[in-house]
Image (cartoon, rainbow, N blue to C red):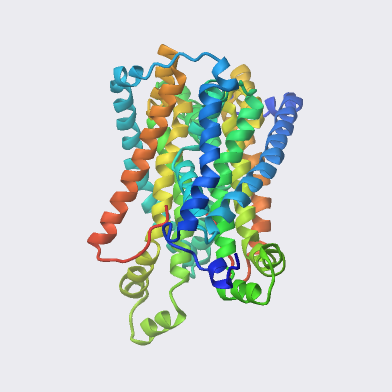
Amino acid sequence: MESFWKWHVIPENLGFFAGGFRLTLTIFAVAWVGCWAFAIVFGAMRHSPRPWLRYPAAAVVEVIRGTPGLMFVVWVYFLSQPLIGYALSPFWAAVWALVIHQGAYGAEVVRAGLSSVPAGQVAAGYSTGLGYLSVMGWIVLPQALRNMAPAVVNRSVALFKNTSLAFVIGVIEFFRAGTIVNGRENASFSVFTFLAAVYFVCCFSLSRLGQRLGQRPGVIEDTTAV
Amino acid sequence: MRVGAAALVRRRPWFETPGDRRAFLLVWGPVAAFVVWYFFFGPRAQYDYNWRWPVVWQYRGFLLRGVGTTLYIFAWSLAFSLVLGLCCGIGRSTGVRWVRALSTGYVEVFRNIPLLVQMWWAYFGLQQIVNAALNEPFGLRILVPSTVACILALSLYTGAYMGEVVRSGIRSIPRGQWEAATSTGLSRAQMWRHVVLPQALVIVIPPMASEVLNIVKNSAVAMTIAITDLMFYSQKIEEETFAGFEAYTAGTLLFLLLTLLTVGAIYLLQWLLGLKVRTAG
């Protein structure tokens, strides 16, 4: 029993865990904003009637969606220098990787949301003399956002889970803090159970919110395991 | 130029009008020109990177071995997660309360914990349990193989998502079908076997396909517990040659190839089953 029942390491290293958790939250918050900016731009492009916007956006989104998130994090971190001539710090590499990778999945959510509004309504809007912005602001978005809300929350849960990938490039976020404590104390059972419990509490409460938003017909579901 | 509402709404197919072709060149031409300039003459060119693409061919053995391991993990995880997902999806739709509670609990727990944490738990945490329960009392030396831990975690994680897919497929069967099955005197098992599942399992193929693709992509996480998969070997080539760009690009392209082949296989399956269902990537 002695060897694996080592719960005392959690309170002993609580400050270290808290620091890691704070960094996880920071990555999540920054990447969340960027992810949805990316998603809105590319989702709107993919929804556009103009083929010269639709096809390039589709190519970008599909290629990113076909690549593992972990590969993306490593790619952005190691290749920022040969590719853009500027070495990103691990933190910003992780943020950019998550923005682009999760943004591509978010773009699909945005596209599905925009498509959930019948084309007849958009046409009616244009024929009453409204412009693009008015049609979007008064007709499409109020309906699309309500239909998208649960999928947006689910995507955010996925983003939160994926912040743990930042660990491979040496960002000391919550998961890496756990592995460091584990390396010092040799308490993998206790440490990883603790990590799992904390991640579970955060993600479960978020996804409960998503389920509450999704108790109506006509909503879009996004339950992709990435 | 005045544009009618129809032109603003109808999704025009591939470059129908000359205006579309012009707009494509006018918008993306400068973007492409800027990228080319930036890459070859702009600030990036200041950083002198030594391109060594032959390295990829030189280390093709590594990449092939990596693909092999990834496919091995993929195959086992696919088999286990399909079974898990099916059981769990049916379990969540039955009237038996404890079965439903069990499957709901499973789905919620495994969907809300990062795969990375699950994999490390299955590898390092499980080893400590095995040590305390078997190795120390009985003087054994059992080691949890990393492949087992990886396949276990990947199957449990994907199975939870597949369970949700199967459940929503079952839920989409109209009430009338259940009632008709009951009123023709079918037993509960016969109803599932002959009425509900044949219809539900066809409906779930497209969303299931995207979960299958996710196994390929998520298997990259196995690299962190020293599984020698494609991701691992990409990193190994980088470590041996310092040609990081080339190695990771090759790895990424191979992952893309694997996902494309999987999509192709799923299309083939649908065609063999004679179904006309669109597969979502």
Residue drawn at 34 percent across, 77 percent down:
B187
Q: From what the image shows, is residue A99 above or below residue B51?
A: below
Q: Is residue A206 visible?
A: yes
Location of residue B194 by image quarter: bottom left
Q: Is residue B145 visible?
A: no
List the single residue furthest toward the bottom: B183
Image check: B189 left or right of B132?
Answer: left
List the single residue furthest toward the front: B1
Q: Give coordinates of residue B65: x percent, y percent.
A: 30, 26
Residue drawn at 45 percent across, 78 percent down:
B174
Q: From what the image shows, is residue B112 above or below residue A219?
A: above
Quadrant in the picture for the N terminus of chain A: top right
Residue drawn at 61 percent across, 34 percent down:
A96
Q: Nearer the viewer, residue A3 or B165?
A: B165
Q: From what the image shows, is residue A8 above or below residue A43?
A: above
List the single residue furthest toward the right: A15
Q: Nearer the viewer, residue B87 or A53?
A: A53
Location of residue B1 by image quarter: bottom right
Q: From what the image shows, is residue A185 above or below residue A216?
A: above
